[in-house]
Image (spheres, grey):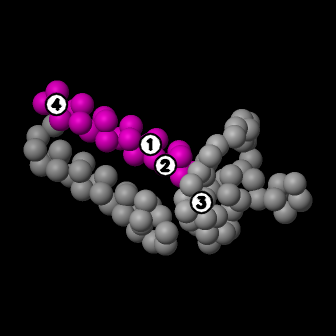
Amino acid sequence: MTRSHTAGMVVGMTAKVTLSFSDETIEQARECAQRDGVSLSAWIDRAASEKALREMFTAHAVAVRKAGLVNEAEALADEREIEAVDQAIFASGPRAAW
């Protein structure tokens, strides 16, 4: 590991795991990380965190809607917000194809 690789890691990373990716996925992730100016590890950490948050937000919105705690207009606004977040995160570069 070189100094430049270590310097680009996210502060606070505590787990080291072995993962397998398709060649296409890892190449896209490397390009995105380079474009964003972060290490591959930092980029994958952020992408996984964003995915988990989107899924939790979506599950919460569905549960609230099923419970009848919001009206239809608010439910539609939630769906539009989810779409806007996805568009902001994945609209540019190779991530749009994921």
Q: Secondary structure at mark 2?
A: helix
Q: Is residue 9 in view from this perspective? A: yes
Residue 57 screen position, x and y as percent: 35, 41
Badge 2 is on which residue?
Answer: 50
Dot 2 and dot 1 residues touching (CB under 8 Å): yes
Q: Give the image location of residue 82, x and y in percent.
A: 31, 52
* Secondary structure type for disc 3: helix
Residue 19 belongs to the span the image colors magenta = no
The residue labelled by disc 1 is 53
Q: Quadrant of residue 83?
A: bottom left
**Image quarter (top left, top right, bottom left or bottom right) of the C terminus:** bottom left
The three-letter amino acid code for the residue at tag 4 is: Lys
x 24%, y 56%: residue: 80
Taking depth in this image into account, of 9 and 26 the one nearest to the observer is: 26
The first of marks 1 and 3 along the sequence is 3
Q: Secondary structure at mark 1?
A: helix
Mark 2 and mark 4 lie on one chain; the one further toward the N terminus is: 2
The 10 Å Cα crowd at callout 3, few under 14, some 14 to 19, many 20 or more, is few
Q: Position of residue 60 (x, y in %)?
A: 31, 35
Q: Amino acid at mark 1?
A: Leu
Nearer the observer, 94 or 3:
94
Is residue 52 located in the magenta-colored stretch of the structure? yes
Q: Which residues are magenta?
A: 46-68
Q: CA distance from mark 1 to mark 3?
A: 26 Å
Q: Which mark is residue 23?
A: 3
Q: Which residue is mark 4?
A: 66
Residue 36 seen by the camera: no
Q: Who's the residue at 31% across and 41% down the image?
A: 58
Q: Nearer the viewer, mark 1 or mark 3?
A: 3
The residue drawn where x is 59% and y is 60% is: 23
Across the whole image, how many numbered discs are drawn on residues? 4
